[in-house]
Image (tube, rainbow, N blue to C red):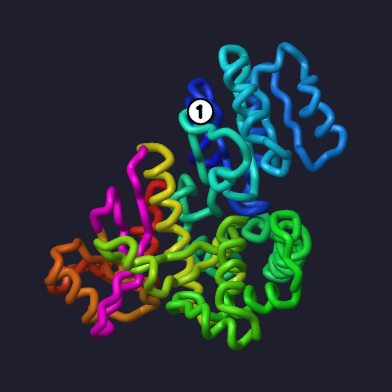
Amino acid sequence: MERKQKDIIIKDLNKKIVFLSGPRQVGKTWLAKNIARNFENSVYLNWDEIEDKKVILNKSWLPKTELLILDEIHKMPDWKNYLKGLYDTKKDILKILVTGSARLDIFRQAGDSLSGRYFRHRLGPFTLAEFETPKHEYLDKLITRGGFPEPFLAASDADANRWRLQYIDGLIRTDILDFEKVHDLKAIQLVLELLRRRVGSPISYKSIAEDVQISPNTVKKYVQIFEELYIVFRVNPYSKNIARSLLKEPKIYFYDTGMVLGDEGIKFENFVAVSLLKHLDLIEDREGQKSVLNYLRTKEDHEVDFCLTINDVPQLIIEAKLSDKEVVPSVQYFNKKYGIKAIQLIKDLRTERIVNNVELLSAFSFLKGLKG
């Protein structure tokens, strides 16, 4: 199965360094090696491997190398200056693909800026839009197992669950401890478990802090770590006053829908969130348009699950429902008051139609038509 980013990444490699980031085990290494097949001479080096580390430090790959793939290079001291030097001296003969399971563009403290020298691409889990001919049963499978390749393709639900237990343990004991010095491993595990149970609800750092008996600032720090390692993503309420929006309570969703602990409705909402985020990430990474996933909420408790915002302008509001056939009043409220196109996305729907200017659409049909 080809990943949708492949062709554009190959084109971008002819122009600049390409950063390919995304969650652990989402398929970055597979995609990088798949891209390498398009080059006669390529080399893959992982900073976590001792022998590879020596080659990286000594720059001792063969002179005929056309494509250099560097995995987890952000763990290298002064890695940005290293890449800057490579790009500035070898950009005419060497294409550079950098992969990692942390946000490669957040390490601004790590030396000289690479501004203007790279393109960013984010690789997400499988969604319906990525399949050339998606089947209806894929929707249920993506909701229950999530879109990470190994559990999705596993022979059974039991195998998928076994993978997830090891995955979560690896996130806590390896990725997080490699990324940040965390002194209270039990506390960060508890915060993660609480977030798994509070998907789709506005998150109160104070409430979680009281449950875990740590400070709200520590909770906030842990959530930021989860974000930077692509474990969760935050959906903030939309506001024309961005600073005010960031002060309001965000919602938290997981990249791996299989990590969500809740009923089918919550898992469905999380999968919709992942699909919409991936759609917006592709718009931003490919077209350079600022694309953000928000939600809408007023002081009068009118609330809609999602608002797709492009270049700071709300383009579409979406409410995700399992089977409700009546239009949610809040969707009508925002559509009527602000004139934003409105969709009620329903998992089990027989007939698509328009009610009071709100489109009631099949989740399968809509989600498979997104960008990726």
Check residue 290 for magenta coloring.
yes
Which image quadrant is residue 97 in? top right
As drawn, 324 above or below 123: below
Magenta span: 288-315
Left or right side of 321 for 234: right
Q: Give the residue drawn at x 16%, y 73%.
A: 355
Which image quadrant is residue 240 in? bottom left
Mark 1 neighbour density, 10 Å: few (under 14) some (14–19) many (20 or more): some
Prevailing SS of the magenta stretch: strand
Image coords of residue 40 (percent x, y): 67, 17
Residue 162 appears in the rendering: no
Q: Give the residue drawn at x 79%, y 43%.
A: 48
Residue type, mark 1 in image = Arg
Q: Nearer the viewer, residue 225 or 171?
A: 225
Residue 95 appears in the rendering: yes
Image coords of residue 119 (percent x, y): 49, 33
As drawn, 46 above or below 194: above
Q: Give the residue drawn at x 79%, y 28%.
A: 57
Q: Give the residue drawn at x 55%, y 28%.
A: 17
As drawn, 292 above or below 265: above
Residue at label 1? Answer: 117
As drawn, 290 above or below 165: above
Q: Nearer the viewer, residue 183 or 325?
A: 183
Check residue 184 for magenta coloring.
no
Image coords of residue 132 (percent x, y): 47, 45
